[in-house]
């Protein structure tokens, strides 16, 4: 791999092999076979699980069906988090394929948002992009785009069209050379064991004295616990897209190359597995 | 950005330079003397040393400074002696200059100074106006002031020959003393300030500089005659003054300001090309009436000043019409001096910490910049400095810094407490607004910032000036202050017996000479600054006391206890930075110590960084882990469907008459082809007679997309093979530039996808450049050079590579060099994209900023009438009084725009004196009537005149090119084939823009930029060069004659001597290209010539054979294939100039070929096919049996082959094998 561009492709075409099984208490007419699927890391659960739904509907009665939702080992999976993030956060150290349980009843109102249609996902996705651009360019780039450009971003994600998406998304990744980066880096840090959904603060890619901020700088500022002290062994893994970048990786580069389509850098901080 | 240097002098008089690529101040080891001041320009640096002499440091260059001396030997025929040196009494001398008016025997030539050396002995020039002469070099005439010919005729009574000898400036990279003599003997008093500039005033003579100097008595001197061939200049001329000057500053152009003792400023007026010294001074008041100016610095269009209270001021309203400006603006920051460097960038030395500061954000639109930023890099001596510097500081201080050392180190609080209040008095006297200094803290050791250099301006300004000024106003305060200071110093000195011995010499000098006393009275301020600087200064002091102990400590921790460098003078006149330059100067302390990673981001190629490698590795690991075993799983999103359509509106240049722009809808439909490859169709929907119609083109049939930017429309052209034949592309205009670039980027990705072209061009690629400077490449198919049925030229697919070039040359190993319009040299980095190809269509690495500069010309036309002489009132039939070269287009200064929105003006309109035909002193050229030939002097028959105005504009773009500084080139050539191993040197020759022939050393596959130039001597400037197979080097001189370089081998890469090859009769050659064996040249009338009779034993050949006319340029490749840029190519729709053409029928036994095949054009300026070594297979497989080949069919053959059947079929077979 010689080029940063290939990173974008690798990130975009990241897939998680998943095994969907129907929740045991769901009422079926006959036994439901598990369903295997390669889920795009960049996408959203409810956007790519039409096939799953179709598969299980075959064995169920229409009256037993309410809104579909998913859990992994008892944790309800938030559809509005990118799939890769859900996996990294909850299942990164488990065996593949990722085993997800499918529910059609008892929607956990407290944990999950309803997702009646794809337009809800689109609205969520676009609002994330807009928020990210507010941080990056004071919304100047996204506001300069036309409706069809917004649509192109969404359609690119929905249809898994890398070129279509990036033809537009590259504009969101530009910045004035003399400034050396975005205004603020749109990022969210997720902790498995915290009550807070995530940490999000204003953080610049360049320090006031002109230094390049790194992933380590960000964690030091925002969540210092995640950084191992010199004497102790590593307690946390800092995972983006299933990989652990070095702490000296420049944040601006990460933001340009490892952001999700919603333009946020979703960083999972998970405890190092004990074994 | 080429490497250039920022020069500075520290308070100890040591000279340092800081490279724009470097990260530490390099001490100029050669400077055995301490220097007071330096003033740098790009090619050299001038300085005043402590001995008050002026020194010159000319930077060494791969092209030496050589000067050709010439003299003529004259002889006359007489029946007795035949030709002999016995001349008639009325004749010229036997040895004379070219006019015969001056006596010039060989032994009358002397080296101008000891800084020069002779290159060799005298020899005879055997080239006469491009024609080789007989062995002896004689040229004959009837009588002396007459026309000479190279042939002896019956009536040749006199003859002469030219002797030449070169001398070379040898004192480069060293400080050479300039004798301080005026035209009338030694100068009365030593120099005190110096400023160099003025190189933009005139390019004649080449490298001309203005050097202004100020003597200690306040007189101003101008150094005459500095130019490239005379770097030292001739002598000093005094410039009369309205007062006494303390400091002077000279910009790159015609701006010269100086500061008077009284604190006003004076501005030099009347500086022109003919009079670089200017004519008169105008006084400008100090920015602050209470605190006079002490320092001024000027650039191209800016003036900065510092007043006595260290406030910094910016002068508003400076331009070429108004060198005085209109008003002062106070700026933030307190500086002791300011210097304006190249691009009006500003450098300063802060009065607080004596650090060098760079003014950030200075652009041509915001010349005052935004903020000061400290240059924070260590000095090369810093590791040792704690021991050596402190001892040397003692030493040098002993010579120069009388006040300092005494106060330093051992010295008591006595002197401080004594000096403190007394200085306070002075301060108050000088600038009432400044707060009284804090009482010196007793417990904290005092920062000992040596504020004094020998005769530094501070001492002048603050001690002497105070004496002067206050002497004028309040003699009471000033009067006692100096003696008191002297007394206290003497007293202090007495109290420090250990140092007294060392100090005595300067001390004895000090009081005796109060005019340029070394005492610094301003030290009070340092008491206020007990900041980090103070602590560090103190650390240094302790070091100096116990140097042994700290020495080891310092070794271990080189940057921990940094001795803060204290600067006295800075000069950015040679430092080519602007506000976009990436400099690593501002945070080095941390960068060096801790954050190695961020360093690697900015300096080393980013892809080598560990973090990047880690990400690449982990991503591929992740793919393996998460996907490799699960490929049989179903994809969540199906890829099969979807045609992706992009639509837009555009304007289309209608195919039929009357041609005009019409609104059309434009759509690109993209779909995946059967094998997963992308394909698409372009649709263009228009209305014709109320009827909806459309035009379409298949993406895989598009041969090229050409952006055609001009100032009014954002257009581009789409060619297909058919459209190329017609010479009539689909021309489209987008509403905005952005939209055009979006479409172009999309279409070019689409075209490349459909043809399976990805990533950087191959080594075999053909490169071409359009007249707009856009660079295109074409991947040659193996059948491109097959014979007799090569790929038709018009079907070749060209795609754009970023960057802007005038010419590009490649070879089959993938080494590619380019030259810009401004003669800057660029080497291809291996990337692709750049320019408009944003994001996905480019590589992220290996793309760099590229700039180019060119001139836009307009003509001012005038007609003579008997009443008023020449005026701008022409006849009604005349051309516009302001026009383009043809006179058909009106071009005024105001309405002429840069060539496209990408270009911005970087200078104002200026008269161009360099136009062919010559001009008078005001730039006028005269003619009898308008569309005729012009000459540079007025005659009685001339009724019209014109002059050319030029304005520079600059383009900034990106592309896979990196600059090869520092020598600008006009031509370059690379051996088309050759070295196979990656370390084997690749011969590369070039011509500098001054006509020097250069041979590049160290070019290999790994280092395509090479290392250095080897200068190859010639007797005249050259203009074109080419190296072919077996290292045959051919070149064309400016006089149009051809030369062959003998004995060029790997061992002797520059060969031994030039062989003069006569040009075709009455033709001046223009360009040469040498392939494997073929040599082709183009002359100034567009004729293409082939060199006959080349054999290994006679590599110079025998004669020229005419091949074709209307040829602009030729490129002969490693297969001896011949490609040209042709003019006047007729298409079915229109005529085109600048068309790429391919010579058909070129074979080993028939190197001249038969006919032309026409490709892309017009508007093409340059092509190189020297990378394409896809050999036609016939050469390799002559042994195939006819029976085998005969069984193969040839689908392409539609008519009987002109060559044996077997040949053609072998090619087919060969291609199949190859694929």
Image (spheres, coloured by chain):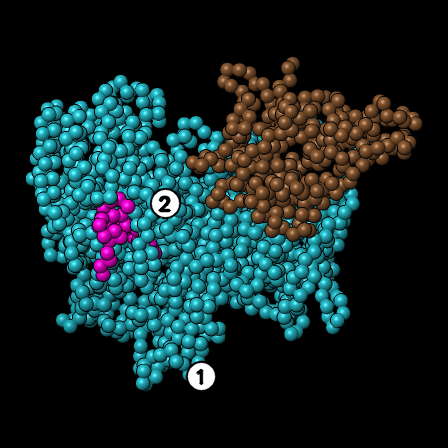
Instruction: Read off the magenta span.
Output: B282-311
State the residue at coordinates (48%, 36%): A206
Seen from the viewer's position, the closer of residues B1066 and B804 is B804
Residue occupying image coordinates x 69% and y 47%: A152
The residue located at (43%, 61%) in the rendering is B855
Q: Chain of mark 2?
A: B
* Disc 2: which residue: B359
State how far apart marks 2 and 1 are (Cα): 54 Å
Residue A26 visible in the shown view = yes
In the rendered image, which residue does mark 1 sit on?
B876
Left/right of residue B203 with respect to residue B737 in the rendered view: left
Colour that chain A carries in the picture: brown
Which x, y percent locates residue B4?
36, 44
Location of residue B1035 (image quadrant): bottom left
Q: Are marks 2 and 1 on the same chain?
A: yes
Residue B1131 vertical placement versus A246 (above, below)? below
Local packing at callout 1 (Cα closer than 10 Å; few below 14, some 14-19, many 20+) is: few
Q: Colour of chain B?
A: cyan
Could you tell which of marks 2 and 1 lies nearer the N-terminus?
2
């Amino acid at each position: 791999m010689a080029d940063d561009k290939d990173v974008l492709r690798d990130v975009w075409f990241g897939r998680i092999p998943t095994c969907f099984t129907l929740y045991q208490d769901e009422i079926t007419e006959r036994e439901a076979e598990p369903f295997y699927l390669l889920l795009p890391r960049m996408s959203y659960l409810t956007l790519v699980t039409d096939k799953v739904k179709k598969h299980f509907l075959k064995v169920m009665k229409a009256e037993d069906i309410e809104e579909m939702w998913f859990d992994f080992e008892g944790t309800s999976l938030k559809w509005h988090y990118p799939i890769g993030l859900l996996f990294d956060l909850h299942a990164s150290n488990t065996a593949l394929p990722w085993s997800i349980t499918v529910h059609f009843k008892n929607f956990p109102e407290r944990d999950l948002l309803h997702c009646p249609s794809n337009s809800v996902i689109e609205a969520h996705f676009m609002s994330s992009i807009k928020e990210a651009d507010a941080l990056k360019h004071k919304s100047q780039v996204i506001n300069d785009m036309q409706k069809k450009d917004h649509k192109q971003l969404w359609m690119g994600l929905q249809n898994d069209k890398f070129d279509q998406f990036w033809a537009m998304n590259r504009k969101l990744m530009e910045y004035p050379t003399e400034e050396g980066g975005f205004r603020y880096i749109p990022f969210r840090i997720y902790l498995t064991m915290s009550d807070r959904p995530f940490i999000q603060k204003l953080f610049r890619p360049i320090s006031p004295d002109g230094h390049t901020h790194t992933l380590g700088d960000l964690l030091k500022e925002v969540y210092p616990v995640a950084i191992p002290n010199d004497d102790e062994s590593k307690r946390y893994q800092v995972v983006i897209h299933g990989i652990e970048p070095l702490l000296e990786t420049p944040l601006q580069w990460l933001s340009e190359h490892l952001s999700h389509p919603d333009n946020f850098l979703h960083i999972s901080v998970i405890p190092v597995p004990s074994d | 950005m080429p490497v250039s240097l920022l020069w500075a002098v520290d308070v100890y008089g040591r000279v340092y330079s800081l490279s724009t690529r470097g990260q530490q101040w390099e001490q100029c080891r050669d400077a055995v003397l301490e220097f007071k001041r330096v003033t740098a320009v790009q090619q050299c640096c001038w300085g005043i040393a402590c001995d008050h002499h002026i020194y010159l440091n000319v930077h060494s260059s791969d092209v030496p400074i050589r000067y050709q001396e010439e003299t003529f030997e004259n002889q006359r025929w007489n029946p007795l002696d035949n030709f002999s040196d016995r001349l008639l009494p009325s004749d010229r001398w036997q040895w004379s200059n070219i006019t015969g008016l001056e006596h010039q025997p060989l032994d009358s030539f002397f080296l101008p100074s000891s800084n020069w050396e002779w290159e060799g002995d005298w020899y005879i020039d055997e080239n006469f106006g491009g024609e080789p002469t007989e062995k002896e070099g004689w040229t004959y005439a009837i009588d002396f002031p007459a026309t000479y010919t190279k042939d002896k005729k019956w009536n040749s009574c006199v003859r002469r020959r030219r002797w030449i000898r070169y001398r070379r400036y040898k004192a480069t990279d060293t400080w050479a003393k300039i004798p301080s003599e005026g035209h009338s003997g030694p100068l009365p008093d030593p120099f005190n300030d110096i400023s160099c500039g003025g190189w933009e005033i005139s390019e004649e003579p080449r490298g001309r500089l203005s050097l202004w100097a100020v003597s200690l008595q306040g007189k101003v001197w101008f150094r005459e005659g500095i130019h490239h061939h005379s770097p030292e200049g001739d002598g000093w001329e005094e410039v009369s003054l309205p007062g006494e000057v303390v400091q002077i500053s000279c910009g790159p152009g015609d701006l010269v300001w100086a500061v008077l003792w009284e604190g006003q400023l004076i501005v030099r007026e009347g500086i022109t090309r003919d009079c670089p010294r200017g004519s008169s001074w105008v006084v400008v008041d100090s920015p602050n009436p209470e605190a006079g100016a002490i320092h001024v610095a000027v650039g191209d269009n800016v003036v900065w000043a510092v007043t006595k209270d260290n406030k910094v001021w910016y002068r508003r309203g400076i331009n070429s019409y108004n060198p005085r400006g209109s008003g002062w603006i106070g700026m933030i920051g307190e500086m002791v001096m300011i210097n304006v460097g190249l691009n009006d960038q500003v450098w300063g030395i802060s009065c607080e910490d004596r650090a060098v500061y760079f003014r950030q954000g200075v652009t041509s639109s915001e010349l005052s910049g935004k903020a000061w930023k400290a240059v924070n890099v260590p000095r090369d001596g810093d590791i040792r400095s704690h021991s050596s510097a402190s001892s040397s500081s003692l030493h040098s201080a002993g010579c120069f810094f009388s006040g300092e050392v005494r106060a330093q180190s051992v010295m008591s609080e006595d002197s401080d407490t004594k000096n403190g209040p007394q200085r306070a008095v002075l301060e108050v006297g000088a600038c009432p607004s400044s707060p009284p200094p804090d009482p010196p803290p007793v417990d904290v050791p005092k920062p000992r910032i040596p504020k004094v250099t020998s005769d530094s301006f501070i001492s002048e300004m603050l001690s002497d000036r105070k004496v002067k000024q206050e002497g004028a106003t309040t003699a009471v305060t000033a009067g006692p202050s100096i003696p008191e200071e002297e007394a206290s110093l003497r007293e202090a000195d007495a109290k420090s017996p250990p140092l007294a011995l060392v100090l005595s010499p300067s001390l004895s000098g000090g009081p005796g000479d109060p005019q340029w006393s070394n005492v610094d009275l301003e030290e009070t301020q340092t008491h206020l600054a007990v900041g980090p600087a103070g602590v560090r200064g103190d650390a240094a002091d302790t070091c100096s006391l116990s140097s042994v102990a700290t020495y080891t400590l310092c070794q271990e921790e080189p940057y921990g206890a940094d001795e803060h460098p204290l600067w006295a003078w800075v000069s950015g006149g040679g430092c080519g930075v602007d506000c976009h330059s990436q400099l690593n100067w501002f945070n080095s302390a941390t960068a060096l110590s801790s954050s190695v990673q961020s360093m690697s981001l900015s300096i080393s190629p980013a892809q080598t960084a560990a973090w990047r490698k880690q990400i690449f590795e982990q991503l591929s690991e992740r793919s393996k882990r998460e996907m490799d075993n699960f490929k049989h799983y179903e994809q969540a999103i199906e890829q099969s469907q979807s045609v992706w359509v992009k639509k837009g509106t555009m304007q289309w240049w209608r195919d039929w008459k009357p041609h005009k722009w019409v609104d059309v809808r434009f759509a690109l439909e993209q779909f995946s082809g059967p094998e997963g490859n992308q394909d698409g169709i372009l649709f263009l929907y228009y209305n014709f007679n109320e009827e909806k119609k459309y035009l379409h083109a298949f993406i895989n049939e598009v041969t090229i997309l050409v952006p055609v930017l001009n100032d009014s429309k954002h257009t581009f052209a789409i060619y297909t093979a058919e459209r190329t034949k017609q010479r009539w592309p689909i021309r489209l205009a987008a509403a905005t530039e952005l939209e055009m670039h979006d479409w172009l980027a999309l279409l070019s990705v689409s075209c490349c996808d459909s043809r399976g072209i990805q990533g950087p061009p191959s080594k075999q690629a053909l490169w071409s450049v359009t007249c707009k400077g856009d660079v295109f490449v074409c991947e040659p198919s193996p059948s491109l050079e097959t014979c007799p049925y090569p790929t038709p030229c018009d079907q070749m697919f060209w795609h754009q590579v970023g960057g802007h070039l005038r010419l590009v040359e490649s070879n089959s190993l993938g080494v590619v060099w380019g030259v810009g319009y401004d003669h800057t040299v660029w080497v291809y980095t291996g990337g692709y994209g750049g320019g408009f190809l944003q994001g996905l269509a480019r590589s992220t690495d290996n793309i760099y900023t590229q700039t180019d500069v060119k001139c836009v010309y307009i003509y001012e036309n005038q007609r003579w009438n008997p009443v008023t002489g020449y005026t701008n009132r022409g006849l009604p039939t005349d051309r516009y009084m302001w026009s383009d070269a043809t006179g058909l287009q009106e071009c005024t200064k105001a309405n002429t725009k840069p060539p496209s929105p990408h270009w911005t003006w970087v200078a104002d309109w200026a008269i161009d004196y360099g136009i062919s035909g010559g001009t008078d002193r005001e730039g006028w050229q005269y003619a009898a009537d308008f569309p005729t030939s012009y000459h540079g002097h007025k005659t009685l028959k001339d009724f019209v005149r014109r002059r050319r105005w030029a304005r520079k504009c600059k383009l900034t773009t990106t592309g896979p090119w990196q600059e090869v500084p520092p020598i600008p080139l006009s031509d370059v050539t690379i051996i088309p084939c050759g070295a196979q191993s990656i370390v084997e040197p690749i011969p590369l020759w070039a011509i500098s823009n001054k006509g020097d022939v250069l041979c590049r050393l160290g070019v290999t596959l790994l280092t395509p930029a090479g290392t250095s130039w080897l200068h190859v001597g010639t007797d005249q400037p050259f203009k074109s060069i080419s190296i072919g197979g077996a290292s045959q080097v051919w070149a064309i001189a400016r006089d149009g004659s051809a030369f062959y370089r003998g004995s060029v081998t790997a061992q002797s890469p520059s060969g031994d001597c030039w062989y003069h090859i006569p040009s075709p009769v009455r033709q001046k050659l223009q360009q040469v290209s040498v392939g494997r064996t073929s040599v082709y040249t183009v002359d100034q009338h567009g004729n293409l010539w082939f060199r006959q009779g080349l054999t290994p034993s006679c590599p110079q050949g025998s004669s020229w054979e005419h091949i074709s006319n209307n040829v602009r340029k030729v490129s002969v490749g490693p297969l001896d294939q011949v490609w040209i840029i042709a003019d006047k190519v007729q298409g079915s729709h229109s005529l085109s100039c600048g068309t790429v053409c391919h010579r058909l029928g070129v074979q080993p036994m028939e190197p001249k070929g038969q006919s032309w095949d026409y490709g892309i054009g017009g508007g093409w300026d340059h092509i190189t096919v020297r990378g394409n070594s896809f050999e036609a297979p016939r050469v390799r497989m002559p042994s195939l049996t006819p029976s085998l080949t005969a069984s193969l069919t040839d689908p392409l053959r539609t008519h009987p082959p002109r060559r044996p059947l077997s040949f053609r079929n072998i090619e087919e077979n060969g291609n199949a094998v190859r694929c």
